[in-house]
Image (cartoon, rainbow, N blue to C red):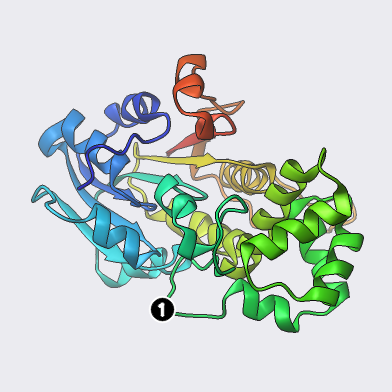
């Protein structure tokens, strides 16, 4: 386990799960094992920890020399509910999702997640399966690219950037960065590049669909008194978490035109965060990548 890795909002996470019954804690985004290390160190034998990650490279780095109460498994978010049921895992007291990228993924030039590092445009969380971002870019139509950049990146100049991508079909991060700068100019470059790279990464990994499936499927499997917590880093993720928690607390999203409820509401969670928690100023100064973090959690009833 990489004990030098500092997880986001570690103190808040420990406080949230201090109040739950003993049982199994699922770290659904194990990464380098930072949150699992905090939980294990804070609570000792209170939890048996199962660390899940889609990225086999992160599991290999973070999953070495683990305490005997921590086991890891590679899988996608969407596979987690079936894994729990098929493995007949019971007494789930806590589930944590820490979404997005970790620093090791972002800083690895070969992964292509960052526009500041030269490398191939790969962007897959699991480099053993599925097409790379470059392969998808090479065959995606301009209209589809516009939709992807608007929907997942919320980029105002999506149309012009998509047109340039289709014209040049870049396959490395430097070419993509230069292309974006050429469209938006140097002043808007950093924010636009971050949005474009985010959009492509979300699209390649189907991140929002994976999150929706996991949240809706895992919540009913948590024991009464157990808690489900999610740290998100942009409004698309946070919106999904907020809506699912509201649905699972019994809020109906059907309009007055619907003769009966079809939105899937169910009263199985009590929302503990009316507004998301954010990192303390000290943590944001120490770790700039934590600045956009929003933490929501709910309790199984």
Q: Which residue is mark 1?
A: 128
Q: Whole-percent x and y of residue 64?
A: 16, 55
In this rendering, the answer to whether 253 lies above or below 44 is: below
Write the residue at 35% across / 24% down.
11
Q: Residues within 10 Å of mark 1 (few under 14, many from 20)?
A: few
Give the secondary structure at mark 1.
loop
Residue 7 locus on image (x, y percent): 37, 36
Where, by quadrant of the figure, is residue 204 drawn?
bottom right
x%, y% of residue 206? 60, 67
Q: Residue furthest left?
A: 68
Residue at image x 38%, y 53%? 28
Judge whether 105 appears above or below 22 on screen. Answer: below
Query: Is residue 263 at all visible to an observer of this figure?
Result: no
Q: Nearer the viewer, residue 132 or 33?
A: 132
Nearest the camera: 66 or 113?
113
**Residue nearer the viewer, 41 or 289:** 289
Q: Residue at x 65, y 45 (%)?
A: 243
Q: Is residue 157 above or below residue 291?
A: below
Residue at the far bottom in the pictured view: 139
**Horizontal placement of 76 versus 73: left or right?**
right
- Residue displayed at 62% across by 53% down: 115
Q: Is residue 266 visible to us here?
A: yes
User: Quick one: quadrant of the C terminus?
Assistant: top left
Looking at the image, residue 173 sits to the left or right of residue 259; the answer is left
Disc tally is 1
Closest to the observer: 191 or 54? 191
The percent coordinates of residue 289 (x first, y second) are 52, 35
């Amino acid at each position: 386990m990489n004990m030098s890795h500092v997880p986001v909002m570690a103190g808040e996470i420990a406080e949230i799960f201090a109040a739950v019954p003993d049982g199994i804690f699922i770290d659904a985004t194990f990464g380098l094992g930072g949150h699992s290390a905090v939980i294990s160190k804070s609570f000792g034998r209170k939890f048996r920890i199962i660390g899940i990650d889609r990225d086999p490279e992160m599991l290999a780095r973070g999953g070495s020399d683990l305490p005997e109460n921590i086991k890891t498994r590679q899988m996608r978010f969407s596979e987690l509910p079936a894994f729990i049921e098929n493995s007949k895992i019971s007494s789930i007291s806590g589930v944590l999702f820490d979404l997005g990228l970790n620093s090791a993924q972002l800083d690895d030039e070969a992964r292509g997640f960052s526009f500041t590092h030269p490398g191939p445009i790969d962007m897959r969380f699991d480099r053993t399966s599925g097409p790379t971002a470059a392969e998808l870019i090479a065959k995606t139509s301009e209209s589809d690219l516009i939709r992807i950049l608007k929907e997942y990146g919320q980029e105002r100049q999506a149309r012009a950037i998509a047109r340039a991508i289709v014209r040049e079909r870049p396959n490395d991060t430097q070419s993509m960065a230069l292309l974006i700068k050429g469209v938006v100019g140097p002043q808007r470059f950093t924010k636009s590049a971050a949005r474009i790279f985010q959009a492509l990464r979300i699209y390649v990994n189907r991140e929002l669909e994976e999150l929706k499936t996991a949240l809706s499927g895992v919540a009913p499997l948590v024991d009464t008194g157990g808690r489900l917590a999610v740290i998100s880093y942009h409004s698309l993720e946070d919106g999904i978490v907020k809506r699912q928690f509201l649905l699972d607390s019994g809020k109906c999203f059907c309009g007055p035109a619907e003769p009966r409820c079809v939105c899937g509401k169910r009263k199985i969670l009590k929302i503990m965060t009316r507004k998301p928690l954010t990192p303390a100023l000290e943590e944001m100064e120490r770790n700039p990548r934590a600045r956009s973090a929003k933490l929501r959690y709910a309790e199984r009833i």
